[in-house]
Image (cartoon, grey):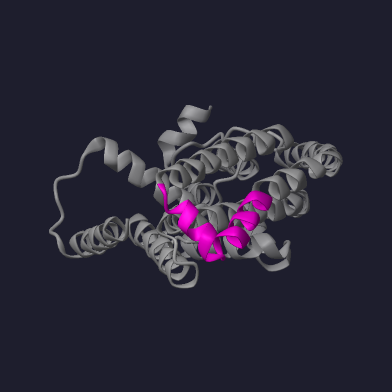
Amino acid sequence: MTVVIALFLGLGVFLVFDACTAPRARSVPALDGVRTAMADWLVAGGLGNVSPLQFATACLGCGLGLAAAVIVVIGSTTVALVAFAAGIYAPVAYYRSRRRAARRARQQCWPEAIELLAGAVRAGDTLPTAVALVSERGPLPLRAAFRAVVADHRVSGDFVGALERLGATLADPTADRVVATLVIAHRVGGRELGQVLRTLGGFLREDLAVRKEIVARQSWTLVAARVAAAAPWLVLLLVASRPQGAQAYDSLAGLFVLVGGAIATAVGYRLMVALGRLPEEPRVLVGTGASALERSQ
């Protein structure tokens, strides 16, 4: 089993080296789609400067590091395999939770930002001026995004493109609705934009109030899922810390127990989380650019 682990570690190091040094091959459409989806996920998680290859390499490094630590501390190669899989998934889980937390923070702030936009428009300001007002006086979680829109507009002179890039960066259903409303108003004009924004802000406040109440009532489901998923593996670490336990898990039967337990934990945790989490709203602007807005209309 130690030879197998060494072979896997050597293969991982070779794959990382080959990916970093090999010449760029001809792109495959399926791989391009996966790469684009992963890049969008990284941007939404606050990792816009990280490429998908770099993130995959970091995940592999975390897995190898955790597996090496388990081998040194516990000495069980089969437990190290489980630690390797957990280490690979750890960055994904962390940035997924970070992405959800950032989205929740922005959702709490959108009604206030929309009120500022509506007030500026009703006062007679232009849309670029209203956006600049939000970048200066709006909620803190949204100021950086609106500052980027103002800077983009000043550099490119394309206000519609700056708004569409804002929607692509935030990757949020509420942001898509606001961006679509502002883009249509900027293109075709209209005197009812302030009223439309106020109505949208009212709907968002009501939706947030309902979601808060539901999340508060279902939070125990998420807590129970995390405790139920973590408890068996804490017991595993305690048992494997003894030499007899480590030897037992190094056998073929121990490997099957670990694999079956990992599958049962993953499936059970995902089912409990799916039951306790509210469904996310579908996005209006799936892509970027004018074509995405045309598809949404």
Q: Nearer the viewer, residue 186 or 213?
A: 213
> Can the viewer see residue 23 in this picture?
yes
Q: Position of residue 186 (x, y in %)?
A: 57, 43
In the rendered view, tell whether residue 28 sits above or below residue 115: above
In the rendered view, tell whether residue 108 sits above or below residue 47: above
Say whether residue 250 is magenta.
yes
* Quadrant that contains the N terminus: bottom left
Q: Nearer the viewer, residue 19 or 83?
A: 83
> Can the viewer see residue 189 in this picture?
no
Q: Nearer the viewer, residue 63 or 117?
A: 63
Residue span colored magenta: 230-251
Q: Position of residue 84 (x, y in %)?
A: 43, 57
Say whether residue 140 is magenta.
no
Q: Quadrant of residue 265?
A: top right
| Residue at image point 64% right, 57% down | 234
Q: Quadrant of residue 49?
A: bottom left
Q: Quadrant of residue 192?
A: top right
Q: Position of residue 210 (x, y in %)?
A: 84, 37
In the rendered view, tell whether residue 257 sits above or below residue 128: above
Q: Main secondary structure of the magenta part?
A: helix
| Residue at image point 43% right, 38% down | 290
| Residue at image point 64% right, 43% down | 178
**How many discs appear?**
0
Q: Position of residue 206 (x, y in %)?
A: 84, 38
